[in-house]
Amino acid sequence: MSSTASGKNGTWRNWGGNVAARPAREVVPASVEELSEAVRRAAEDGLKVKAVGTGHSFTSIAATDGVLIRPQLLTGIRTIDREAMTVTVEAGTPLKRLNVALAREGLSLTNMGDIMEQTVSGATSTGTHGTGRESASLAAQIRALELVTADGSVLTCSEKGTDEERAVFAAARIGLGALGIVTAITFAVEPIFLLTAREEPMPFDRVLADFDELWAENEHFEFYWFPHTGSTNTKRNNRSAGPEKPVGQLAGWFEDEFLSNGVFQAAQWVGRAVPATIPSIAQISSKALSARTYTDIPYKVFTSPRRVRFVEMEYAVPRAAVTEALRELRTMVDRSGLRVSFPVEVRTAPADDITLSTASGRDSAYIAVHMVKGTPYQAYFTAAERILIAHEGRPHWGKVHTRDADYFAGIYPRFGEFTALRDRLDPERRFQNDYLRRVLGS
């Protein structure tokens, strides 16, 4: 399990290397029944329980000193329902395996994030998303859920169930691991389709001036801004009648591996050794990626390899506030003396109806800031966070932030619904950890 970060002597570490934990014991259940039994045994021993996927969260959302559940045996597709156009998949299935398996069946998810290393349950429970004008996060594509609750019983919920099941469904799609351990997810799927990606550099000021137009004219619009420069790289993905025109193998290797991962890694090393070189490197990086257009099946267009390890903070702001927030971010970087070698990523999502979704009840834009693994990120993230919370920003649950339950109660109108449901499902806080105590209250 190379993607699941793990350390020596029983220490668990996340992918970004900024979180470590020492669980009392690890369990790798081979069935839902075994998982239920592990939860019941933990209760008898007075231990907390947490499930962990591939460790792609930068928060300590999965850390525990109790029982660590690894779901790597709970993988694979259970059923495909072609009439309902749904697929039910075991919680520990990595997104990349789901995408490949669906493609073989001539099916696809409607939208996805830009990496596919995570497990389906880890990705959805933290609100992982891509970018989309109408199509929302991975969790918004869920049609039913199965989870093991604190007493070891198995609960299934969907939008069609009883009032209580509907209440659970509204919250558990992005459940933060606080309501139970997800064991299976039913996603809506559609017949596989083609996307044409158009990537091209564009001046930062032009992207901001034309942002509403770029958003309105494209099904999936995103861009990367290189701090210390006036340059961005934009990406527009739209459905296409074909024909398929994938990126050639050599060009793909050169652009996606050599430039985006290899040269980028080398530039990060130079930047760490000599921070003064970062603005010049940023100028070169921002110009190295040339325009290209290609057409392929969705997961080959939406996702790309990320081999350079980093730490990330991301906030959702109301979509109408995004250009103002970005201008403030640029001003802050320019005045701060900070040296930022990693691009800022900007994406959008439509409003959804999930209780603690970062896009709950409002059309949203996402601003993500990154620092390469091992560099001090606090000063930059703190300054960025100050700007983003002034715009009523909602932090991604799996990325670095300093917010707590009082803050969330103010920016999530239905926050109380979630905590009341948690009181009913987990009164003894079997699934509690330090992170959940901070963000949900005790």
Image (tube, rainbow, N blue to C red):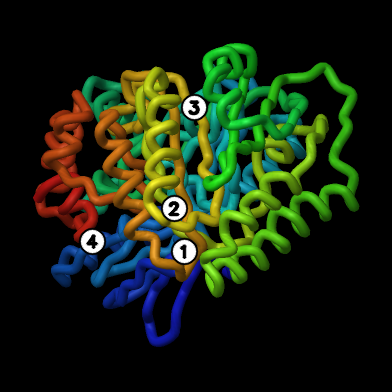
Q: Which mark is residue 40?
A: 4
Q: Which residue is mark 2?
A: 312
- The residue identified by callout 1 is 16
- Check if mark 1's residue and mark 2's residue have beta carbons within 8 Å: yes
Q: Quadrant of residue 206?
A: top right
- What residue is shown with label 3? 348
Report, in whole angstroms, how far the alpha carbon at label 4 lies from the one at label 3: 41 Å
Q: Quadrant of the N terminus?
A: bottom right
Q: Of marks 4 and 3, which one's residue comes earlier in the chain?
A: 4
Q: Nearer the viewer, mark 4 or mark 1?
A: 1
Q: Residues within 10 Å of mark 2 (few under 14, many from 20)?
A: many
Image coords of residue 284 (percent x, y): 70, 52
| Residue 255 placement, left or right of 113 | right
Residue type for callout 2: Glu
In terms of depth relative to the viewer, which is nearer, 438 or 341?
Answer: 341
Q: Left or right: 160 with respect to 194?
A: left
Please tell me whether residue 193 is drawn above or below residue 62 in the rendered image. above
Image coordinates for residue 149, horizontal then vertical, percent: 26, 47
> Dot 4 lies on which element?
helix
Q: What's the amino acid at mark 1?
A: Gly
Q: Is residue 223 above or below residue 335?
A: above
Asked whether disc 2 touches disc 3, contact meaning CB atoms under 8 Å apart, the reply is no
Give neighbour class at mark 4: few <14, some 14-19, many 20+ (Cα, 10 Å): many
- Which circle's residue, 1 or 2, is located before the other in the chain? 1
* In this view, the mark in front (4 or 2): 2
Q: Sequence-wise, which precedes: disc 4 or disc 2?
A: 4
Task: From the image, state whether disc 4 or disc 3 is nearer to you.
Answer: 3
Question: Which badge, 2 or 3, comes first in the chain's sequence?
Answer: 2
Q: Gap between marks 3 and 1, in whole Å?
A: 24 Å
